[in-house]
Image: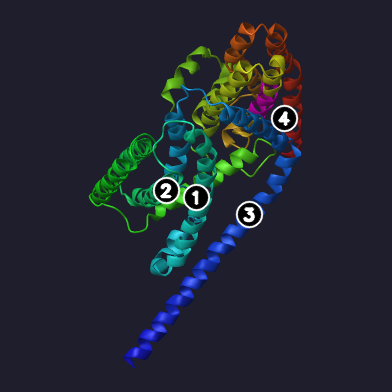
Amino acid sequence: MMAKSQEANQEQKQLKEQAMQKLWKKRARSFREETLPYLRYMGQSGFPLFLSLFVITGVFSYIKLIRDVPADFPTALVGIVALVPVLCWSPFRTFLQAADVVFHMPQESAMRRYWGSSFKRSIIALVALCAFLLLAYWPIYTQGTGPADMWLLVLAAAVLRIANTAAAWRERQLAWGGMRMLFRVARWAATALAWAGMLTRAPLYAGGFIILLLLLFALLYRLPSRFVIPWERLIEEEAATRRRYYVFFGLFIDVPTMPSRTAGRKYLSWVMNFIPYRRLLTYDYLYAASMLRMEMGGILLRLLALFAFIAYWMADAVWLSGWGAACAYAVFMLIVGAQLGGLRHTHRYTVWRHVYPLPDAQRMESLIRLDRWTMLIIALLMWLPACIMLLRANCLLAAAAAPIAAIVYLLTIRPLRLRRAFAADAEED
């Protein structure tokens, strides 16, 4: 009887695990089907063609580099910068939902295959990316003074990749956010040191150093208190991942509104002091505060830094006599404008608009005014590094044409588009 009872319990457990694995596959498939229409809109926008332009340019630059690597080329530094983020970055898609805390947490013991599917998905993608970058880096590394063979670098990368995956899971289990961040920074720093040692030192010493680091971190991760399954943390990460997807798709088409997070960003709060304290500028202040404190503010800052760097890089190469940088700048401005255009949906359905004595037409004028100033500042800061390089290369026409075209667009075409979008929103409401 005892044996039959154990067999029945074991069979029931396996059935639950299989059901959980099917649930994971169902949610993954549902997410793919949910995002597929937005991928089509992204393809129709011309973004893949624009991205392929950078890929082709990068491939030609890479081929030119490996044919003639300069003697003073920082081979080890390039290997660290290119591969350490891929070795350390450990995303973990679980497709969990807030209600799972109620319905699936009691079945935690039967979710082994559920977590296994998430680990498998993450590891396969990261290993493929790491292998691609390592193969691309190898021709550069062989022309330097590195002492390691290819199979040793592959072995070291595999060990560090697996160790980082396990360590990232331990960090998710930690109960305290500050401790989690401390361990994450230490893990990234240790991985950078270990990989730098592998690229520059004798393999025997570098391998011994990696083993010591693994033992040290294995002991350190045992010290803090932690959860067995960090449900709240995993649900937060899944929500943040979905939010990033929809923010990206929002560059090309309107997407369903998701709960947004706010951040203080005290380093930008001084901007609010430039808005006079007047009733006429109430909406100016409101929209400016919303833009700076919501996710949109962080996205605009990251886009500004990224696009300014790419424009500078293309201007420094004097690609197409400077017109390559100018065309890229125009596309970048359209992308930033599409992102900033989502600000008009902020406070669209809030009740206080109908409570306070503020005319609704004033909201449109305030938003257009804020949009104009924001785009002008971004346009100036984004083009400034590229403009300096083009002026040094004597590409005066390209250096002047890009900002002039941007200013004309921002002062004439864009306000009209915003007004039409407001009119369309009013008809829908």
Question: Mark 2 sits on what residue?
Answer: 161
- Residue type at the position of mark 3: Arg
The mark that comes first in sequence, 1 or 2, is 1
Marker disc for residue 422: 4
Under circle 4, the secondary element is helix
Q: Which amino acid, mark 1?
A: Val
Q: Earlier in the sequence, mark 3 or mark 2?
A: 3
Q: Is residue 386 left or right of residue 178?
A: right
Indicate which label's residue lies in the foreground, 1 or 4. 1
Q: Is residue 187 magenta?
A: no
Q: CA distance from mark 4 to mark 2?
A: 49 Å
The residue carrying pointer 1 sits among few (fewer than 14), some (14 to 19) or many (20 or more) residues within 10 Å by Cα, namely some
- Per the image, label 3 sits on a secondary structure element best described as helix
Counting from the top left corner in percent of width and height, residue 67 is at 59, 29
Q: Residues within 10 Å of mark 2 (few under 14, many from 20)?
A: many
Q: Nearer the viewer, residue 62 or 299?
A: 62
